[in-house]
């Protein structure tokens, strides 16, 4: 019995050293109770394929768009897009965006930032990364977040916690458990 | 795939903490309303950490960490500075590090670093170091330019050195998923500065090296000539994870070291790193080393068998090899 426990412990240590993926927790990106989810696996929950969360509070360039991951993570910033609320052609449609890179090809992205003084690569915990905006391919201001492995978007991270259209996107409400 | 959930956010934690701690401390007494203050939250945390279950201890630490951003800074700092109980020092340090992370301002960790370097009690120094765990502490130390892990690892107390190692290993893996050059190079610098071979070996062997510069890679290669077999084994493991630009240099250094290395655990680590650097391409090298040490032939055979599965993820390949060797 003890031998098996030791073997298991060694296997866990080996996996940890080798960088196996882990589940993180993601809260809503906007500290406004009006923020809610308006697209998940399909746009508006009934349109074409989307496989990401869109969260908005019907404002642009005024509310902070925060890092969603609970705990310290390294947010890498891809900027250069001029301020926009209703879309622009920039960064392949992502607009100003951040990527948190995990293990084994997993990443977590937040898109369409309206850049401000907070925008830039940084390691932080739910900090302000810019403002809610609509840079890139966006029909209106919102926060788009997705969890991908080798570029393919996953849906389990938000489906598994019951997040759907109409769910709260407030900054203390858990909206998903992305893999990193 | 190993899945583990990190801290989750808990709304209205402070009030719940007061209720929870009161329940622990007074059990049958009815809950009484009380004024919420930093002192009362800290007392609740102290009680919870002394008497609570492991889950409740995690909970009260979360209360403090999540509430730190809303607490008056001077009161929080004063509570940290007068605290003597190491468990509470660690929880308060984590709260201050969380405040730094939530506000993107490194200054809240200044008192924690001062205490980690200067407190006369080694248990308090170690607790202060642990308070910075799983945050962007290396980045914040670089911004503050006062104290860093290469200095803290020289501490005479083993528990402080152990805390430094734990922080760097955790930060590299959890905060950056191994992708931070700054954390990797700080781990290399701390390993070189460490008076403790065990700590140096763990830093080299467990912190990801996937982003290190060529200069840091040379430093790791130099550790293959350490007097300590543990450090040499750690350095050998580290070289298996260097970026592709440094792989050729690492491969030739490891191959040369294998031929002159007397210790079997170091040889084993070298074989593992040669496979990690080359995957299928490592097979000719493994064959060329077969005659060097007959006791390593089962190890080489296990790697060859694992490589035949053509697994493309390193951790799966390593797990397969370990399964074969059991």
Image (cartoon, grey):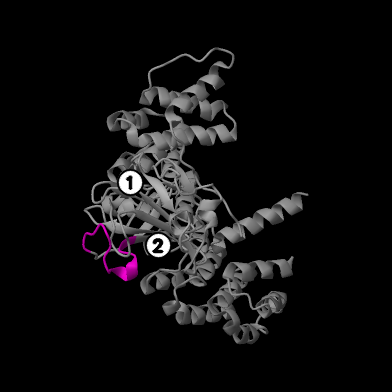
| Rendered position, A92 above or below B166 | below
Quadrant location of the N terminus of chain B in the rendered image: bottom right
From the image, give the main secondary structure of the stretch colored magenta.
Answer: loop
Q: Which type of secondary structure does the marked residue at label 2 adopt?
A: loop
Q: Residue furthest front?
A: A46
Residue B180 badge: 2
What chain does mark 2 sit on?
B
Highlighted magenta segment, given as a residue range: A82-97
| Rendered position, B324 above or below B186 | below
Name the side, left or right, on which B12 lies relative to A60.
right
* Residue B248 spot, x, y in % from top left: 47, 82
Asked if disc 1 and disc 2 are in contact, CB closer than 8 Å, the reply is no
* Residue A17 spot, x, y in % from top left: 55, 61
User: Visible in this render: residue B139?
Assistant: yes
Query: On the image, which quarter does residue A133 sit in?
Result: bottom left
Tag 2: Cα neighbours inside 10 Å, few (<14), some, or many (≥20)? Answer: many
Q: Which type of secondary structure does the marked residue at label 1 adopt?
A: loop
């Amino acid at each position: 019995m003890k031998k098996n426990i030791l073997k298991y412990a060694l296997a866990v240590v080996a996996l940890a050293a080798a960088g196996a993926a882990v589940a993180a927790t993601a809260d809503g990106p906007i500290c406004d109770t009006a923020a809610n989810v308006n697209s998940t696996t399909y746009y508006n929950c009934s349109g074409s394929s989307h496989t990401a969360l869109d969260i908005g509070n019907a404002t642009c360039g005024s509310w902070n768009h925060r890092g969603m991951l609970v705990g310290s993570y390294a947010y890498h910033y891809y900027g250069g897009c001029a301020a926009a609320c209703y879309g622009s052609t920039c960064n392949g449609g992502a607009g100003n965006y951040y990527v948190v890179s995990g293990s084994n090809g997993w990443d977590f992205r937040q898109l369409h930032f309206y850049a401000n003084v907070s925008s830039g690569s940084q390691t932080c915990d739910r900090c302000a990364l810019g403002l809610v905006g609509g840079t890139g391919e966006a029909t209106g201001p919102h926060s788009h977040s997705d969890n991908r492995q080798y570029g393919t978007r996953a849906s389990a991270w938000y489906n598994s916690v019951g997040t759907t259209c109409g769910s709260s996107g407030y900054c203390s409400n858990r909206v998903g458990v992305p893999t990193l | 795939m190993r899945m583990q959930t990190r801290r989750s956010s808990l709304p209205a934690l402070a009030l719940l903490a007061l209720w929870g701690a009161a329940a622990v401390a007074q059990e049958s007494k009815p809950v009484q309303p009380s004024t919420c203050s930093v002192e009362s939250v800290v007392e609740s945390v102290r009680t919870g950490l002394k008497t609570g279950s492991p889950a409740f201890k995690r909970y009260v630490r979360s209360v403090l960490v999540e509430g730190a951003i809303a607490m008056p800074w001077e009161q929080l700092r004063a509570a940290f500075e007068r605290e003597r109980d190491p468990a509470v020092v660690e929880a308060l340090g984590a709260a201050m590090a969380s405040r730094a992370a939530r506000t993107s301002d490194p200054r809240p960790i200044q008192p924690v670093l001062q205490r980690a370097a200067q407190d006369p009690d080694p248990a308090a120094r170690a607790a202060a170091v642990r308070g910075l765990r799983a945050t962007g502490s290396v980045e914040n130390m670089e911004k503050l330019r006062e104290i860093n892990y290469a200095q803290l690892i020289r501490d005479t107390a083993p528990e402080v050195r152990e805390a430094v190692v734990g922080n760097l290993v955790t930060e590299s893996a959890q905060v950056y998923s191994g992708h931070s050059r700054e954390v990797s190079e700080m781990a290399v610098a701390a390993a070189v500065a460490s008076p403790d071979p065990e700590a140096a070996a763990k830093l080299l062997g467990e912190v990801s090296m996937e982003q290190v510069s060529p200069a840091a890679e040379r430093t790791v290669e130099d550790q293959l000539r350490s007097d300590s077999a543990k450090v040499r084994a750690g350095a050998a493991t580290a070289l298996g994870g260097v970026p592709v630009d440094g792989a050729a240099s690492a491969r030739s250094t490891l191959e040369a070291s294998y031929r002159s290395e007397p210790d079997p655990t170091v040889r084993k680590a070298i074989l593992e790193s040669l496979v990690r650097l080359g995957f299928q391409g490592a097979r000719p090298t493994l064959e060329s080393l077969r005659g060097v040490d007959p006791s390593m032939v089962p190890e080489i055979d296990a790697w060859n068998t694992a490589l035949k599965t053509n697994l493309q993820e390193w951790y799966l390949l390593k797990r397969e090899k370990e399964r074969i060797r059991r």
